[in-house]
Structures are given as C-alpha cells and as structure tokens.
Image: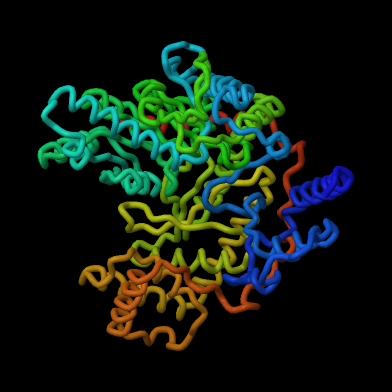
C-alpha cells in the first residue's frame, strides 16, 4: 500500500468508523455465532500474494461484525463501560502513525513528558494529595499502565519488597525466603478477581476478608484478619481496598482501613478502576476521602472517562518503592541521568505506547466540565433505571445504586436466584439488550447487573431495557411449569451443596437450567435425578472451564424496532429542574454511602 492508496483507504475507513458509531443502535447488541464461526468465513492459510484494499474492506462487515458484541451500543449494559470517543480514536490513530517507543526519556522525550503532565492534570482534577503529584517534588507521581490488573500486581510486588527490607533490618537473622513464605495480602471478598490473580503471579497468598451487609470491607474486619494471621505466624503486608466493586459498586471503608494499615505498617492500595473518574465531580469526591492514607491509587479512564483501552492510571506516594524493585538496566538501555522519570522502572513492560496522547486529546477536547457532564448523565440514567425497578413490586434493588450500576432481582426469598437467572437468560437470548449477573452476600444472592456503558445511551434506551425485563418477567411468571422446574432444580442445588456434592457455585447449573431442552416434563423432575445432575455438573466443572454451548442456530430472534412510546423527552420538558434534582440526588446518595462507613 502506497501513500495514495493509504489516503483512499483511510477516508473509507474513517467513514466506516463514523457510520458504525452513529448507527450502532440499529445493530443487535450481541452476536448469534457459535465458537469457531470464523474458520468457515476465511481461508485456512494466509494469502501467498498481496490482496487489495477493495478486497479487504468488505470483509470487515462480512467477517468481523458477525462476531462482535457491541460494547458501545446504547443497549449494552454488561460488565463496565469500555469507553471511547472521537478524540480518543483520533489520538490512537496518531499514536500508531508516530510509532515511538517509550523506553526512556531519550527514546521519545515527548512521550515521557506528556505522561508526566497529564498524570498531574488528572491528579489535580481528582484532588489527590500533593504527595502523588510530580509537580509537588515530594517523591511521588503517576504513570499509565495497561490495566488495573497490572497496577495491582506491581504494587503488590513493591509492597513485598518493602516488607522484606523492613523486616530484615529489624531481624537480620531472617532470610528473604523465610519472610516471603509467610507474607499474606488482604482484600475484600467482593474485590475483583485480579487481586487474587496478582497473588498467584507473585507467588503470594491473598486472603479474602468477609464484607459487611452492604458488600463493603470495614476497618474492623481488616484488623481482625491481621490479628488472626499474626497469631498463626504469618506476616500481613498488603491491603487492596476497592472503591466501586465490580459486583455491586460498593465502597470499602477507606479511612478506617487506612488507619489500620498505618498502625500495622501495611501497604494500602486503592483499586477504583470503574468509580475513579467519578471523583472528578465534586459531589462524588467525598467517596475518595481517605486516599491520603494510601500508598498507591489506581483508576481506569478507559472505563468511565471517554478514553479507549488501554489506559489505566496509577499513582504512588513514593516512586522509589517501584524503581527500587523494577530497576534493571542493560547497556543498550542506559541513558544519561536527568530529572525526568524512566517509566520502564515503574511497570512490567520496557517499551511503552504513547498512551498519554489520548488522555491529552480527551481532556482538552472535552474539558473538565465536559467530562463531569458526561459522568453525571451516566449516573442520572442509572438512577432512572433504579426508579423503574423500585416501581415494580415484583423486583427489588439488591444494592444501593451510587454511580452507573444497578443490581436488581426478582423478589422471591426462597427461589429468587433461579427465577432471576432464568429471567436474565431470556432477556439476553432476545438480543435487544445485554446484561450479566453477579453474586452478592457471600455468593448466595444472584442479581442482574444493569450498567450504563455507552455514551450513546439515552432515556429511551433505559426505558427499552426495562420494558424488555418486564416483558420477559411477564412471560416467565405466567408459565407455572417453568417456575416449578426452576424451583425444583434450585432445591436440588441447595441439597447438593449441603451434602458437599457441589463445590462450584451454581453458575454451570444456571446455564444448564435455561436450556430449551424439554426432555423431562416440568413438575415431574425427581430430586434424586437432580442430585445426580449436580454431581455430574460439578465433575464437568472440575475437569474443564469450557463455556456452555449457545442455543441452536435460529433460536435467537433478530432485533426488532424500538417500541412506540420510547422516544426521548423533548428539550422543553424541564432540563434545568432535572439537572438540579440530579445533583441533589447524587449528593444525597454520597452522604448515605458515607454514613454507612465508620467515619
């Protein structure tokens, strides 16, 4: 491809990208393909001779799009947002064109210096303590990682090194191996699985500590866990607190946890991957109170701040905690010392992409107020969905909705898990909206997670999602035989769990229950048969972690046009009053969340 061909192709691709973004609402949000679909659409071996752009371009729609789960669809309400925006897309285009490698300041001076600048900008927007800013000159600073998973791993490794150094200075007779084998990290049982994974990669034990009834980790629970570990001869060294958990967007009691960490000389890391950007808004900033007690703080602009993946920002109080651990130089990497940081000593990778460019584009082209307005709009839409859930007595909100996540379920004390799962399966199978579940209350309460993810989401999309939930709930609850079948199987799960036959929490069964197989008549399922099925499923889960097969081809209906009556309200419907109410509600929610903490 020469320059002229590139210009032609670039124009076509920009048009495709723009049309895709602006018309994404018209596409079914989830794909209807089976695993392995792609091999039927492309040759089994690579082409021996170059193809033309005109041959490749149609395959974007023919090959790529059928396998897309459309994360930026206004009907996508799963996981957390995978953010993007036109400024971010432009910045990534320029980054790829520049093609520089941030090995050191000398290898790409602007890459390092712009990262220092935007990390201080963002730190100021969040009102982080001066110790976390380069401009303060107090030894801290921030850089951009690929993910929150990486941030947790490198801070855990840094905390291990600091603990070993301290303990060996106090007790020189101890070897590094003596200490490492007794180290234990602590986190909430609601923390992201990446914390446990970081422990696996670092060769360290991570203990999940039970959260309270609001799914938050408390200072008292951390103190009790520390005391238990010390009594057992172990050495607590690291605590990962979460602000905005994945399961329910719960907020750990940061100030009290921080006080325990300070008293016990534990490294306190804050994972605010999703919720972090919301702290730019003054009404949500109190949820970050206690950050002054932390050693490190991480959030993901690529979740809630209009910046495309990968862009995970990490600040540390003392940069030497990282550089002392990761500083390994070869002659070909050596450069003259200067006042700028060498970010290869702050992370796992040596060669760094120019990630700061997209943050710079987004912050400049939206402005701080534009970013705040976007976050507030996302939160207000989630609040509307929460209001709709509370208006239907068949449903309950399972956790307070503070930001853009609403956890809800069918209101059935005995069989709510199985019925709620059956409902979610029906909703997702229709492919008009897409959501995922989570488990709360120690893995005993199954809930549906509704997240406002797309920057294109509007009030009509929230109303559409709720109408889909209600429509499928009406159909499910109107089929007594379906309810009987679900309840019978749920009873078998509880019996199997009590007998120790089922070690894997229900998730494989949830998928199996909602298959369209009707080989046994509803209401005629024998408990012994179901106990056998539980045992069999548990064996399957132990042998492999393969995903369940999707429904047969043709079982998923195509997306239908939006129903009448879901058009967005007009601009004359009281925007100013709605914004005032939105700010007041947000402030009230933060006050309520903080009131539950041990301030």
Left or right: 176 as drawn, with respect to 240: left
Q: Nearer the viewer, residue 235 or 8?
A: 8
Whether residue 284 is visible to the viewer of this picture, yes or no, is no
Q: Quadrant of residue 557?
A: bottom right
Q: Give the image's coloring scheme.
A: rainbow
Left or right: 193 as drawn, with respect to 127: left
The residue at 55%/72% (across/down) is 475
Left or right: 162 as drawn, with respect to 356: left
Q: Quadrant of residue 546?
A: bottom left
Q: Quadrant of residue 413?
A: bottom left
Across and down, in percent, residue 444 comes to: 32, 58
The residue at 40%/26% (across/down) is 323
Query: Does 539 sit above or below residue 387?
Result: below
Across and down, in percent, residue 483 comes to: 44, 75
Q: Could you tell me how many numbered marks the image carries? A: 0
The residue at 62%/68% (across/down) is 430
Query: Does 342 sit above or below residue 228?
Result: above
Whether residue 378 is visible to the viewer of this picture, yes or no, is yes
Residue most extreme to the top: 137
The residue at 52%/30% (across/down) is 332
Across and down, in percent, residue 538 comes to: 32, 72
Across and down, in percent, residue 512 comes to: 44, 74
Q: Quadrant of the C terminus?
A: top left
């Amino acid at each position: 491809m020469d320059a002229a061909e590139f210009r032609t192709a670039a124009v076509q691709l920009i048009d495709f990208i723009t049309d895709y973004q602006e018309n994404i609402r018209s596409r079914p949000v989830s794909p209807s393909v089976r695993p392995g679909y792609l091999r039927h659409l492309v040759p089994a071996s690579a082409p021996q001779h170059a193809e033309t752009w005109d041959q490749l371009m149609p395959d974007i729609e023919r090959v790529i799009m059928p396998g897309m789960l459309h994360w930026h669809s206004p009907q996508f309400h799963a996981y957390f947002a995978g953010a993007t925006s036109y400024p971010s897309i432009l910045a990534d285009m320029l980054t790829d064109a520049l093609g520089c490698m941030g090995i050191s300041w000398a290898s790409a001076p602007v890459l390092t210096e712009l990262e220092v600048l935007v990390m201080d900008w963002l730190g100021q927007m969040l009102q982080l303590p001066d110790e976390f800013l380069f401009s303060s000159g107090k030894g801290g600073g921030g850089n951009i990682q690929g993910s929150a998973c990486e941030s947790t791993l490198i801070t855990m490794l840094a905390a291990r090194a600091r603990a070993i150094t301290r303990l060996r200075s106090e007790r020189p007779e101890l070897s590094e191996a003596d200490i490492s084998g007794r180290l234990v990290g602590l986190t909430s049982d609601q923390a992201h699985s990446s914390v446990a994974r970081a422990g696996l990669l670092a060769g360290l034990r991570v203990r999940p500590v039970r959260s309270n009834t609001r799914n938050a980790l408390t200072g008292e629970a951390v103190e009790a866990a520390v005391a238990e570990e010390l009594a057992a001869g172990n050495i607590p060294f690291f605590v990962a607190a979460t602000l905005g958990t994945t399961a329910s967007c719960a907020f750990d009691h940061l100030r009290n946890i921080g006080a325990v960490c300070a008293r016990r000389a534990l490294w306190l890391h804050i994972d605010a991957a999703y919720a972090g950007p919301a702290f730019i808004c003054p009404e949500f900033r109190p949820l970050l109170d206690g950050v002054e007690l932390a050693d490190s703080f991480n959030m993901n602009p690529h979740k809630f701040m209009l910046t495309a993946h990968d862009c995970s920002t990490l600040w540390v109080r003392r940069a030497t905690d990282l550089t002392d651990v990761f500083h390994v130089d070869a002659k070909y990497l050596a450069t003259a010392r200067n006042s700028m940081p060498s970010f290869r000593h702050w992370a796992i990778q040596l060669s760094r992409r120019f990630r700061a460019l997209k943050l710079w584009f987004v912050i400049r082209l939206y402005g701080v107020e534009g970013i705040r307005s976007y976050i507030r709009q996302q939160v207000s839409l989630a609040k509307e969905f929460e209001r709709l859930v509370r208006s239907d007595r068949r449903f309950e909100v399972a956790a307070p909705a503070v930001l853009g996540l609403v956890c809800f379920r069918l209101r059935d004390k005995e069989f709510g898990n199985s019925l709620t799962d059956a409902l979610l399966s029906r909703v997702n199978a229709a492919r008009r909206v897409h959501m995922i579940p989570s488990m709360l209350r120690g893995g005993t309460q199954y809930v549906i997670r509704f997240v406002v993810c797309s920057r294109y989401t509007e009030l009509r999309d929230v109303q559409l999602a709720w109408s889909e939930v209600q429509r499928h709930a009406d159909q499910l609850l109107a089929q007594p035989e379906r309810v009987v079948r679900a309840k019978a199987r749920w009873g078998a799960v509880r019996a199997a769990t009590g007998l120790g036959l089922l070690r894997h929490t229900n998730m494989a069964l949830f998928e199996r229950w909602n298959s369209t197989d009707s080989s046994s008549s509803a209401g005629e399922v024998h408990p012994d048969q179901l106990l056998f099925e539980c045992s069999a499923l548990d064996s399957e889960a132990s042998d492999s972690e393969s995903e369940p097969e999707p429904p047969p081809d043709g079982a998923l209906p195509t997306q239908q046009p939006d129903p009448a009556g879901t058009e967005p309200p007009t601009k004359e419907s009281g925007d100013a009053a709605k914004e005032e109410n939105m700010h007041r509600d947000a402030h009230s929610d933060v006050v309520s969340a903080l009131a539950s903490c041990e301030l």
